[in-house]
Image (cartoon, rainbow, N blue to C red):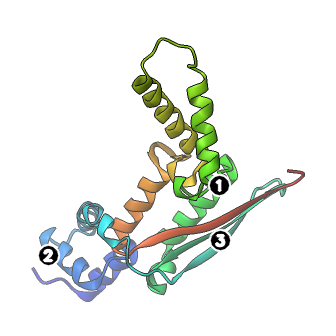
Amino acid sequence: MAIDTQTVSELRAKTGAGVVDCKKALEECGGDIGKAAEHLRKKGIAKAGTRGERTTKEGMVHAYIHPNNMMGVLVEVQCETDFVARTDAFQQFVHDVAMQIAATNPLYLSPDAIPPEVVEKEKELAMAEFEGSSKPREVIEKIAEGKLAKFYSEVCLLNQAFIKDEDKTIEELLKEKIATTGENMRITRFVRFALSE
């Protein structure tokens, strides 16, 4: 089946995937744009992990101001090309991340960004709950690890449940977007301002 350039362009605009990938997906899906987009998404999620090392030097800084004008967020999200940075899908993703930050007020981007002394203090607090308990040390350490994971899910943006779909984390959402566009993306920094906070 011959695929015309208009259809390829339409799929590329929808997914942000490369021209060759779009053409192959359309050929495999009989020219159906919806099926081709889903095919690219499934194929891309498996590859998303391998894209993490690729350089990101394009992207956008997005400002979100809450309707009551008492809170605002600035977030920077990077991608590989300005083509992807200009797509509606990328811009919607960045807006969703800004809304997530406004709603949940994360303190850190990821567990790696937390100062070691803060992690150590949280672990000490978790283990102190079981001081004098008859539980074996290994069990107490496992419980402390679980409490640390919960702590990360509260204070780290990438570990938080996405406010629009709590079945996935922001990190999983990011990987989906990487898979869809075929490009590496990174949430690099953010700041949240709230009146009188």
Q: Which image quadrant: the N terminus?
A: bottom left
Depth check: give the residue in front, 152 or 87. 152
Mark 3 residue element: strand
User: Horizontally, is 87 left or right of 69 in the view?
Assistant: left
User: In the structure shown, which secondary structural element does the residue marked by tag 2 occupy?
Assistant: helix
Determine the secondary structure under disc 1. helix
Nearer to us in this view, 171 or 137 = 137
Marks 1/2: CA distance?
A: 40 Å
Which circle marks residue 101 in the picture?
Answer: 1
Residue 38: x, y in percent? 27, 61
Circle 1 or circle 3, nearest the eye? 1
Q: Residue furthest bottom?
A: 5
Q: Is residue 143 left or right of residue 183?
A: right
Above or below, 19 relative to 166: below
Residue 124 position within the rendered picture, expressed as x and y whole percent measured from the top left: 60, 34
Precedes in sequence: disc 3 or disc 2:
2
Residue 74 placement (x, y as % from top left): 70, 67
- State the residue position of label 2: 27
Q: Does the residue at mark 1 contact the one at mark 2 (Cβ under 8 Å)?
A: no
Relative to residue 34, is residue 119 depicted above or below?
Answer: above
Mark closer to the chain start, 1 or 2? 2
- Gap between marks 1 and 3 measured at Cα: 12 Å
Tag 3 and tag 2, C-beta contact below 8 Å: no
Q: Nearer the viewer, mark 1 or mark 2?
A: 1
Tag in front: 3 or 2: 3
Label 1: few (<14), some or many (≥20) within 10 Å? Answer: many
Alpha-carbon span between mark 3 and mark 2 = 37 Å
Q: Amino acid at mark 2?
A: Glu
Q: Which mark is residue 62?
A: 3
> For residue 137, what is the image quadrant?
top left
The answer to whether mark 1 and mark 3 are in CB contact below 8 A is no
How far across and how far down the image is residue 55, in percent?
43, 81
